[in-house]
Image: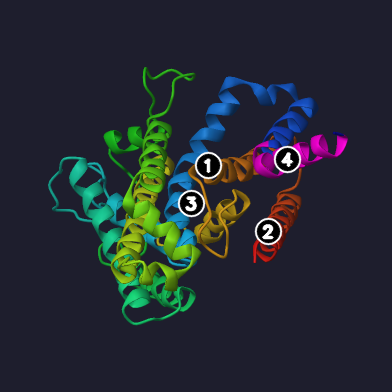
Amino acid sequence: MNQLNAKKVQGFLGQNAIYIVLAVLIVGIAIYDTNFLSIITLRDILLQSSTRMIIALGAAFVLITGGVDLSAGRVVGFTAVLSASMLQMENYPRKFFPDLPEMPLLIPILLAIIAGLIIGLINGIIVAKLNVPPFIATLGTMVAVYGLNSIYFDLPPNSSQPIGGLRKDFGDLGTGAIGGSTYSLPYIVIIAIIVAAIVWVIFNKTRFGKNMYAIGGNEHAAKVSGINVARNLIAIYAIAGALYALGGVLEAARTGGATNNYGNMYELDAIAACVVGGVSTSGGIGTVGGVVTGVLIFSVINYGLTFIGISPYWQLIIKGLIIVVAVAFDIRKYLAKK
């Protein structure tokens, strides 16, 4: 009986380890400083997590297929610059496009998302049709997109100056909240929740989602079972690109500006959050809840340890150790399964 109970406890810990780690982090920091549990602190953590969550969900699509997307951060930067350049105030003295009339808010946002989708589409075609390994394909795209963004950012009269003076309606999208009070739920958090809900439905309730897991589990078996692997991969990379773009737009709105260096290393944060959240590096395994929790863990580390005055260098060490441990557990589970 004791052995049976021990197995049940071990199984419970294995299934819920990620949530236990998050709870331990929050409780540990709160014991050190009880102010950490305030509504304002929670709101700030959610605000900072929102764009990272959307980007990580995009990365999860690719990781579940057994691939990896290194272009995510540069797509974030390009779409942040693209949307910000078209959404500056009419009377701002250093407008990116001095003669551009004020457009409805939705148009520049949609253009930026379409741009991200096209980049993702290109990634998907290179991987699915040219059979280039995802690591190499997206590494090349990462470099090319950064170059494209830098050329665009350097166009006169901007000439590589940080883009600022964003319109109030765009800024409100990133920092505003329902009701407008300090304790209100920010719009950007609501958007992230909606995106997470849609991705959950795709992962769990659609044939496309089942095909994605099947490709990640065994691509050859997926082909034999009649799944059009190439078409699904192209769609997966395109969706991922669109999510990176949405994250880039919201990041520009949240921070009130953009430069061509926006999004640098975001792809590594997204991949790390996914892996810590239980998305297997071997493909075929991953949940939306795990990805969201992985993002929150790193946000709590960043915000919480800064909150109690721990050096950012120690934060990097802790994050690195968590990533290594998470990947080590993932590989052990994969080998045990084989």
Q: Where does label 4 land, which residue?
A: 13
Q: Give SS at disc 3.
A: helix
Q: Give SS at disc 4.
A: helix
Q: Which residues are magenta?
A: 2-19
Disc 4 to disc 1, C-alpha distance = 19 Å
Q: Amino acid at mark 4?
A: Leu
Task: Name which quarter of the figure residue 170 lies in.
Answer: top left
Q: Earlier in the sequence, mark 2 or mark 4?
A: 4
Which residue is at 34% across, 49% downward? 246
Q: Where does label 2 land, which residue?
A: 333
Residue 283 belongs to magenta span = no
Number of residues whose C-alpha sits closer than 10 Å to that of mark 4, classed few (under 14), some (14–19) or many (20 or more)? few
Q: Earlier in the sequence, mark 3 or mark 4?
A: 4
Q: Amino acid at mark 2?
A: Lys
Q: What is the x, y in percent for residue 31?
A: 79, 26
Q: Where does label 1 land, which residue?
A: 292
Quadrant the C terminus occupies: bottom right
Asked if marks 2 and 1 touch (Cβ < 8 Å), the reply is no
